[in-house]
Structures are given as structure tokens and as C-alpha cells.
Amino acid sequence: MARGMRSSLDVEYSAVGEGLGMREFWLYVWLRRLAVVAAHIMSLGLVILTSILSRPGTSLFSWHPVCMSLGFCLCMTQGILLFSADGSPFCFKSRKWKVRLHWFFQAVLLVCGATGFGFMVASKNIKELPHFTSWHSLLGVATMAATVLQAICGVFLLFPKLISTHSFPRLRLYHATCGLVAYLLATITVISAMFTDWFQALVRDTIWYIFLLLPLFPALVVMNQITSAFLPKKKITS
């Protein structure tokens, strides 16, 4: 009988925290929901603040921070967090619609990334400045490459007839892994932008540290969501 009770109480491990008391369980769930909502707000806030600082239209380069923040800070974040059940504003029950919206965000991300990259190259060409001489620019190239790679994996997932049935689960893992790497690279690239002369001439003192925290919190939420969804689940046996 004890053995039967143990087997009936076995549950899969997840990030929600089974095994805790009921009060701690609900507290943890609500903290997760608040974290997801905060990540949405911070990603949007970072785009708005970046747009205010760069004053788009004043120069060719002024469009670079706007396009990149819109693509990598907002669209990339929203495209991942819409699969979260913890406080996401995109409350589609159908996974089909979530996938479609995910692809919409990813398409806008690629367009914004390519446009922002083009504005940066054009601006440096006009000023006759060398390209890819800073850590920020090199990280940006790596981020774009990882983003294109995860998009290619996503195309095969969107059209599964292009691949074998046995490769589909593994490709889903590759797509999620590339997406996580691309997001972390994007976060590091955004943070490195805050050490450039352009940014530090506009933002100083305490406000600079606030800007530094804005991309970090959504990155933690996204990383937790992806790892919780794709890490192997284990059974609790005691």
C-alpha cells in the first residue's frame, strides 16, 4: 500500500516547485507571473527610453539604436515570452496562433536587425570610419548570425515535411538552444552598447545603472522559461 501511495504521489519535476507547501506554491506561482509581466514592461520601456535618447531622424546613426532595441529588446522578448503561461498578455489557448505570432515577432526582429545594421554601416561610410573595431560591433555581428541560424531552424520546424520525423524533436531542441544563445548574445550586445562613448555622453550617474539593469531582468526570465521547458524532467521518488 505504501508503495502504491508513493507511485501515485510521484510527479514530474518542474520549475513551479512541487513538494512545497500550498502557501509557498501559490506565492512562487504569483512571483513567476509578476516576473513575466515585469519582463514585458521592461523590454517595452527600454525601447521607449532608447528612442528618446537617440532622437530618430536627427542622423543616420540615430535610427540604429531604435531599430536594434525594437527588434532585439522588444520583439525577441515578446516572441519568446508569449509561450509562457505565467502572466503573458498573449493569452491564446491555441498553440497554432502562438506559433504564428512567434513567427511574426521573429520576422519583425530580422527586418529591424537588418535595417539597424544598414543604418550603422551607412553612417560609418559617410563619416569614413572603420567598421567592426569595437567589442559592441563584433558582438552585434555574432548576435545577428545566431539569430539567422535559429530562424533557419524555425523554418524547418514550420515546414516539417522538409525534414525526417525522427529529426523533429532534436531540431526543436536545437531551435530553442540557438534562440537562447541568440538572446543572451543580444543582451550582452545591448549592455556593451551602454559602455560606448555615444551612450555614456547621454546617460550618466544613477540613471546609467538603471539602464544597465533593464535588459538583465528579461534575460533571466527568458532563460528560466527556455531551460524549464527543455531540460530533462525527472521523477521525484522520495
Image (cartoon, rainbow, N blue to C red):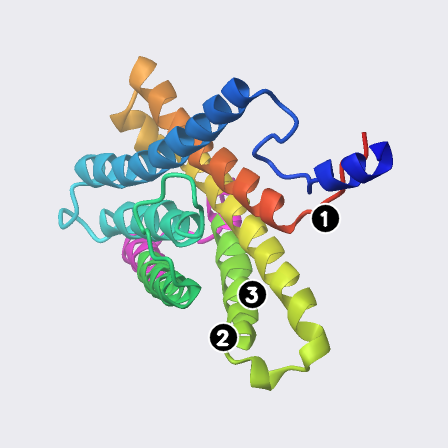
Say if 147 sits above or below 96 in the image: above
Find residue 158 and name its label: 2
Residue 143 percent location from the top left of the image:
51, 53
Q: Is residue 58 left or right of residue 89?
A: left
Residue depicted at 36% across the width and 49% down the height: 78
N-terminal-most mark, 3 or 1? 3
N-terminal-most mark, 2 or 1? 2
Locate residue 114: give its quadrant. Answer: bottom left
Residue farthest bottom in this picture = 161
N-terminal-most mark, 2 or 3? 3
Is residue 184 shown to the viewer in this render?
A: yes
Q: Main secondary structure of the magenta part?
A: helix
Q: Amino acid at mark 2?
A: Leu
Mark 1 sits on what residue?
A: 232
Q: Is residue 97 left or right of residue 147?
A: left
Report the magenta residues as a range.
117-139
Say if 186 sits above or below 177 in the image: above
Residue 164 percent location from the top left of the image:
68, 82
Residue 158 in the magenta stretch? The answer is no
Locate residue 86: give its quadrant. Answer: top left
Say if 194 sits above or below 147 in the image: above
Nearest-to-viewer mark from 2 and 1? 1
Q: Amino acid at mark 3?
A: Leu
Q: Is residue 123 left or right of residue 56?
A: right
Find residue 149 and name its label: 3
Nearest-to-viewer mark from 2 and 3? 2
Residue 62 percent location from the top left of the image:
23, 47
Residue depicted at 39% across the width and 51% down the height: 82
Q: CA distance from mark 2 to mark 1?
A: 24 Å
Q: CA distance from mark 3 to mark 1?
A: 24 Å
